[in-house]
Each structure stands twice: as C-alpha cells, then as structure tokens.
Image (spheres, rainbow, N blue to C red):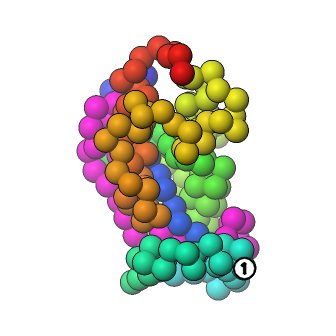
Amino acid sequence: MISDSQIFIVVDIEADGPAVGLNSMLSLAAVATTTNEELSHFYHKLITIPDASPDPVVTEWWSKYPEAHREATADPEPPEHVMTEFYTWITNLGREAIFVSNPISLDYTFVSWYLFRFAPGNPFKNEKNSIRALDLKSYVAGKYGLPFEKAKRAYWPEEVTKNMPAHTHNALDDARGYAVVLRNLIAMGDKVDF
C-alpha cells in the first residue's frame, strides 16, 4: 500500500473546540508506522492560542473525562516550539509522510493550520501542493462497502479493532490505537465482506 520511500503518520489531537483558530489544539500525538510496526512516536501538549477560546459544548464534553482533560492540558508548551519539533520529527524520518487519522476532518484541519502558522511548513504537502492524507473512517467504509454513517469507530468489526488499545481520549493512546487499526486494515488485503 505504500512504497519504501513513504511512512504513515497516524495522528490524534485533542482540542477545546471544533473550529481551528476559534478554538485551540490542546495535545498532539503521532505514530510513525509502516504496514507492519510502529517506528517512532511524538506527543506534546500546547499552550492555547491567545485569540481563541474554548467552545462551551466541548467544555461540557470534557467534563465527562476529567482525567483525560488533565492529561491533555498538563505541562503545555508554546505552539511554535511544538509544531517546529513536530515538523522536524517528521522530516527527520526521511520518508514521504502520509497523514492518517479518524476523523481526518478535525485532526488534519487543526494540524495543517498549526503547521502553517507556527512551523516551517506542512510536511504532508507535496511539491504540487497536494495533500497526502488517509481517513480511516473512509477506508473502513470502502473496504466493507458500508454507508458512511455506519463506518464510525463504534461499528468497526472485531477484525479491524483486534489488539487496539482502549480509546481513552489521551492523544498518544488513541494515535497508537488508530495505528493498530491501520495495520489491521492493510493486513486484510483486498475488500472483505462484512
């Protein structure tokens, strides 16, 4: 599914709202993985951006997960530092990075915006400004021939989630879990019936 010159970067973020710029990314985790194994990981917490504020609905949601929220906000670092380190970590892998997440609409939006604002650039973009990204929900929908609304994590079959750690809302735990899912999906090969 990927060449030797490429690497999957499975990303999970935690945020204080759904709209990048209006809300802030709280934590960023990523797992560099081949089709067979995790090679490296990245995990940092970020200071909220001064011109943003938490979304009230998301604040209420976080109140149900106080331990996860404490972890996501403990010892935050300046976004400039975190995103520059993230950019450097990816480029030092020496391979063409492919962004993978669930849901890509949230994770990629935040990560891309933060990279362009606080880092030297976006390492998921090629020379033609095309973005290399893979949405796990879409991958599951396509592999199993499911309608998009039935391809949520809650509906994923056991063979997809085999060996996936619990989803804890800790960005690193969840990135590692989605990396397991990605490797499971790749190991299945061609389209399978549900």
Residue type at mark 1: give it.
Pro
The reply to whether residue 21 is in sight is yes
Which residues fall within the magenta stretch? 17-46
Q: What element does badge 1 sit on?
A: helix
Residue at 50% x, 16% y is 192
x, y percent for residue 168 = 43, 62
Residue at 51% x, 61% y is 13
When the figure is inspected, residue 92 is found, relative to residue 74, above or below; the finding is above
Depth check, front residue: 173 or 150: 150
Is residue 59 inside the magenta stretch? Answer: no
Write down the quadrant of residue 111 in the picture: bottom right
* 184 sits left or right of 169 in the view: left
* 84 sits left or right of 48 in the view: left
| Residue identified by numbered label 1 | 56
x, y percent for residue 184 = 38, 31
x, y percent for residue 68 = 45, 73
When the figure is inspected, residue 143 is found, relative to residue 163, above or below; the finding is above
Image quadrant occupied by the C terminus: top right
Residue at 71% x, 74% y is 57
Using a 10 Å C-alpha cutoff, classify the residue at mark 1 as few (fewer than 14 neighbours), some (14 to 19) or many (20 or more).
few
* 14 sits left or right of 49 in the view: left
Image quadrant occupied by the N terminus: top left
When the figure is inspected, residue 131 is found, relative to residue 191, above or below; the finding is below
